[in-house]
Image: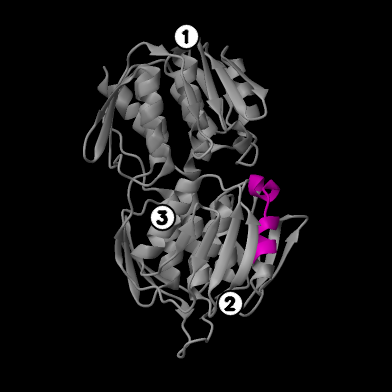
Amino acid sequence: MERTVRPALLRGAPTPPCSKSYAQRALALALLAEGRTTLRNLDLCDDTRRALDAIRTLGARIERLDASTVAVEGGLRYGRRAGEHCVLRPAADRLHAGESGLAARLFAPLAALADRPLLIEGEGTLLHRPMQTVADALRQLGARAEATDGRLPLTVCGPLRGGEARIDGSVSSQFATGLLLALPCCAEETVLRLSDAVSTPYLDMTIAAAERFGAAIFQRDYAEFYVPGGQRYRAVDYTIEGDWSAAAMLLAAGAVAGEVTVGGISRLSRQADTRFCEALARAGAVVVDEAHAVTVVRRPLRAFEFDATDCPDLFPALAVLGAAAEGTTVLRGASRLRHKECDRGAALREEYGRLGIEIEMPEADVMTVRGGAPRGGRVSAHGDHRIAMSLAATALRADAPVTIEGAECVAKSFPEFFEQLERCTAGAK
């Protein structure tokens, strides 16, 4: 699908969807919890739908209560006596993660709580993303796991027992997240050693979510995690907070093209992408922080420096700011971009280049963005929802319309993104 974005001013109060990171964690925990969990403010982007399908496959029963609320009856069967392992009873022998990297890496360890083989599959760009770290860790902890050339499809068979494991944390925190959520259900205690951990705020989210459902996970400097065995997750009534990754793109659009108040978010969130407000301030935008909303007002922007190593999903939104700033913006952490839905560094350089904005990667971990006046034209989303949204935000201040090919990929995380932009455009008239 093509989408044409015309130069425009923005004024309005868009609302991002729920955090898909929290949503997927909450759905996984509802699967493992004893009793009936109620999840509120659950928006159904593609990734969240995949998580719902995954827990249904793994044995959960799901009832939709209204458009944004579901009740989940957990599918884990806890042992009656201490030392007995817990067992999932899957409803099928295949789990399809779509193009969701988090779903694949989150639900693989949970699938290892079943005592029969499951095949975890994916599609599109997910088939090229690494999975060997998951397989290696599961084998260290007593399960069987076999990746296909280090990628999906991945065959998993439990039971997961606990013990000790070492994993490489330099590519993604998602490898550790699934393990940390599954390990409290094991009969044995576990010590998980993580080398070169990145995106540590996401690990904080995982520990906090597990605690909300009644399990304790302890960590030391994000290098060593201790997980007592034999724990039981309890059902809860849980409201999922707004998504800061999506909010950052709306705030970036406002910072370069007008004024927006993004509701349903709080700077007190554990989400890593709250740091986008820091980038906005460094660039010279006006930022007004309220209890459950953030307002940004356009001002002449200046080049800035920012380290996004622990929040790599911000790069496309940071590119929007850098392209509108006077001077050359320097962004660090760019080595994290290769294993996303596409090679985001290369995609940003290519597509912004089509709009007359120079993006370079002079070093493996550094991206530079030279500010300028974007021109209209045709660009490609590269099948990446964040690239599509980034190009749309920059198109708002181009000298002519910008047509984005493959714009439908925004459905992965923010299906109503373009409609939200259009409403803010109408509000500015």
- Which x, y percent locates residue 169? 61, 50
Residue position for label 2? 114
Q: Residue at x 48, y 19 (%)?
A: 322
Q: Is 24 contained in the magenta span?
A: no
Calculate the distance from the C-alpha at mark 3 to the C-alpha at mark 1: 39 Å
Question: Which numbered disc covers residue 136?
Answer: none
First to last magenta residue range: 124-137
Going by the picture, which residue comes out furthest to the front?
A: 220
Provide the residue designation for mark 3.
23
Asked if 413 appears above or below 398 in the picture, the reply is: below
- Image position, residue 344 (x, y; %): 61, 33
For the C terminus, the image quarter is top left
Residue type at the position of mark 3? Ala
Whether residue 236 is situated above or below residue 198 in the rendered picture: below
Label 3 vs 2, first from the N-terminus: 3
Q: Quadrant of residue 419?
A: top left
Neighbours of disc 1 within 10 Å: few (<14), some (14-19), many (20+): some
Q: Furthest-right residue in view? A: 149
Neighbour tally class for label 2: few under 14, some 14-19, many 20 plus, Cα within 10 Å? many
Between the C-alphas of marks 3 and 2, the distance is 22 Å
Q: Inspect the image, locate mark 1, and give the three-letter code of the amino acid beneath it.
A: Asp
- Hey, what amino acid is under mark 2? Ala
Label 3: how many Cα within 10 Å (few below 14, some 14–19, many 20+)? many
- The answer to whether residue 200 of the structure is visible from this angle is yes
User: How far separated are the C-alphas under marks 2 and 1?
Assistant: 57 Å
